[in-house]
Amino acid sequence: MFKHNFIYTLKILGKNKVLIFWTFAFPIILGTFFFLAFSDIENNEKLDVFPIAIVENDNFNSRMGFKETFEVLSDDNNEDKLFDVSYVLEEDVALEMLENKDIVGYILVLDEPTVVVAKSGINETILQVTTDQILSHEKVLEDYIRKNGNSRLENFVKVMMDDYSYVLDNSNKNMSYTMVEYYTLIAMTCLYGGTLGLTALNQNLANMSQRGKRIEVSPSPKFKVVLSSILASFLISLIGLFLLFLFLVFLLKVDFGLFGGHVVLLAIVGNLAGLAIGVAIASCFKVKEGTKLGILLSVTMLGCFLAGMMGITMKYVVDKNVGWINMINPANLITDGFYSLYYYDTLTRYWWDLLGLLIFIGVMVIVSVLALRRNSYDSI
Amino acid sequence: MTVFKTFLKVLNKCKAPLILYTVILIFFGGFSLKTNEVNTSFNAYLPDVYINNLDENAKITENFMTYLKKVSNVVLLDEEDISDALFYRDINIAITIPEGFNRDFFLGRKPKLEIQCTGDYASSLVNIYIEKYMQVANTYRVLASSEEELLRLINGNLDLKTNVYLKTSLDTEAMSKATTYFNFTNYCILAGCIFGVCFSLFSFKQKNIDDRIRISKINYKKYLMQLFLSTFVFAFFLWLLYVLLGFVLVGKIMFTYHGLIYIVNLFLFTLCALSIAFFLNQVILNKDTINGIVNVIALGSSFLCGAFVPVQFLPDFVLKIARILPSYWFIHVNELTTSLEKINLITLKPIWQSMLVLSLFTCFFFLMSLYVKKRN
Amino acid sequence: MKKVIEVEHLTKKYKDFIAVSDLSFDVEEGEVLGLLGPNGSGKSTTINCLLSLLNYEDGIIKILGQVMSSTNYDVKKDIGVIFQDIAVFEELTVYENIDYFCGLYIEDKQLRKEYVIEAIKLVGLEDFQKFYPKQLSGGLLRRLNIACGIAHKPKIIFLDEPTVAVDPQSRENILAGILNLRKKGATILYTTHYMEEVEMICDRVIILDKGKIIASGSPLELKNLAKIEEKVTIEDISLKKTDLEKIKSLKNVEEVSYNKTTLIITYKKGQHNLPLLVEFLKKENLEYQRIFSERPTLNDVFLELTGKELRD
């Protein structure tokens, strides 16, 4: 009987096109959209060469510091190249270029150097910082000469301009926050898996569906039927999750840190959490199946929203200010687990997330068992 | 009128998702359009920095920290939160001043500062600031005879600033916020229109209802016309709602010519969304599939055309593909409007050209839906 | 005869509403018992209590001599139920649906296969085995619904209004199927508000109203409860007042009603009434289109007992 019900539940769920769409196809489609939209966003945040103009008047040519620095910083052979410089003779030409957005800004040296830009922004700031830097060097030389005259000036300049770096970069290599988007996608898929459990269970309960009446008057013990239905839905949602992982790992090249047992374990436990929610909703609420699915989908979307699916800042803000919400939010626990595997060197946080998920599953199971324990109903 | 009333009744049944789309829009709008001050002078970009000082409170380190406070936002955090703050870009860089920094500096050992950064341009900017400070400080160390003189020389040097002029009459920041809002309406209008229209029209489309109407005394053509007008009224109200929301969230700009372009553009796009809805209504055969199709189309167009992610961050090949979607042209007009300085026939040309493309899409989908209906 | 179902003092309340009140009855082996009553009279509630789907406040229910409970699987395996609403899976074919529900009772695959094919034959769905429920007409769907409930060859069958909203042809088929089951020895509890069906297939009838038994017995016995025995209807006849008086004074006549064209005469005793009447009409030269005689129906009984119609 167990096997009989298991196989038929697989068949019934597998043929439910709407459920299969939401649990199998939708995550992959959404993942594709994420990939297309986010693949370049982090590269765009790195310092990039941008175009500027310089009004090449006599003042400019007389300031050697300016002339040389911009020559170096616009040299194609320089690794640290920052600017594409167009030299113009009249300010009007530069102004027109600025208005046409051909350049970020231009430099005009009158008595003092002036930078003209069209808006306040990061590239504009870089341009300003560069000219400040030149002014600073000029000032250092000036101060030196005032104090020591021209003696050993060359040596001093050499010391001043050396390539020595004063910072030691200990940055984490795994800084790609768009990965979190994909983790929320996995969380969403795990929780959507609950729709399968919900549908399967609904069909087993006499107070929820007509088919359930039929099953409950049969001599098959209720817990056996329920368990085999839940197992069947778990298997199907695991297959869906597996497909998503194949897609994420091999096609989108999503980085899970070290892909291994921890990732698999978290995915399975996360999927169980989704199933547990679905089962709990199916057994506790006595409303139409469509309404139950609506409740589950809304809970999932809200959970994923708080876990950062629509912008990872949301996860950070919630974590920081109302941490307890995300501690009971299964979507976040799943997301956070993958995040800690990716970003942290230690596993402490991962285990806490996993524990949180297990507690969540436990609570859902207890709630479901309490609701399912009854064999006769007060009304159906 | 009966047709219209029935239409509204059916529509009422699916109001929940429509409200949801609007709430998301308000949330999103309210979230990203908070500041609305007029900004027409140049402000240097301020990165967010966390400083952890492990050394004694010497003057040179204090002076360094004071300098950083001038050129960046120094953030206070619990030490355990730093990793998360970096990952989620709450700070761009965390700087650790190592133990013995002060001593090593004066011994000429050129001590290094430890940093952890996000690697984005803001953190690169801070990197430049740090290197600059340390270089200047180290250079003056050999020149100055006392610590006081050293600080004076350093600060005198770092205070030098280039003059920066902002050549624009536009409040670019506010304009780009308006564009962000209207770009986002792409999702809400598409999802709302398709969902509302398909869901309602589906009830009318069912075979027995359609047959009943065909044999009733209502003129069938007239009936179709009424149905069409009902959907139009619905779309019109959706447009009106999002325009009014725009006035609330975006503010002043809406009363300028720029605002007018946004509004007209949104109207054209609403018509286009309506035509897409008509087309889908002809193609969709199963009511259960409406929700899936709406989500895929609305989310897809929004992601690919830059409604969620700013257009400049999208890969070029995505933008090229996106040209075959009407949303691209709608968002393109919004983007053009952002940087529209002077309004005249020449500057408006790319705008009305894109609007024309958008309208061609509308015609295309209307004709396609008529064609499919005829063929059935 | 062995008692298969024994119900004593069954009472079921929904909060303040008493759905079934102090109900006691027995069903004997091989019997077809009809539970007749209007909508809301407690028929379905009674069945659901019998099946232990519903908790009840008071009473004892024994089936096959054992106290019925939701975990008494020994009893459950001999019961087949056909509920009022269609309960099949959209995703499974006709064959698979029957096989699924049958599989909850019969573990042996080979035996199950035989049973399923037999059930399909019984309800006449041989040509539709590979069809999905969506492709079936309303009547065929009802038949499938029944096949799902009886494929495992239960000894006791509960049928809760299986013919609601069914076309005449399917109804014929369903009723014939039930009679067939009975022939094979099944005990059947049948609820309906169609009295014609009850008269056709039931050995014994219990009439329920507001959760109480208001009458029970064989259909014939029940009809005797009505004061009348025969009802004669004459259509398209025109009568004077004097004619009416004369008819009233005919032998055995209980009551006469006339509404310009149709005349209905009810008789206390049901012997030789029609010939007498025809003779009388001929003698008086009264012309009419059609005349027919009926035995009183259970509806008349129900009307007599409660003052209202079975079907409202």
Image (cartoon, coloured by chain):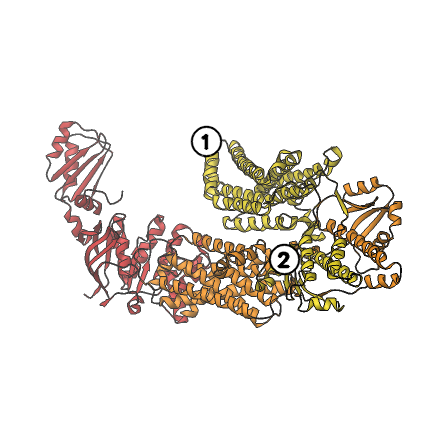
Instruction: Name the chain letter of the residue that bears numbered label 1.
Output: B
Residue named by callout 1: B217
Q: Are marks 1 and 2 on the same chain?
A: yes
Element type at mark 1: loop
Q: Position of residue C228 (x, y in %)?
A: 15, 43
Task: Report crowding for label 2: few under 14, some 14 to 19, many 20 or more residues within 10 A (C-alpha).
Answer: many
Q: Looking at the colours in the rendered structure, which chain would you say is drawn in yellow?
A: B
Using the rendered view, name the quadrant where residue C7 is placed. bottom left
Colour assignment, chain C: red
Colour assignment, chain A: orange
| Residue shown at the point (28%, 61%) measured from the top left | C51
Q: CA distance from mark 1 to mark 2?
A: 70 Å
Residue named by callout 2: B91
* Residue type of the residue flagged with mark 2: Ile
Q: Position of residue B22 (x, y in %)?
A: 53, 44
Element type at mark 2: loop
Q: Position of residue C126 (x, y in %)?
A: 42, 59
Mark linked to residue A104: none
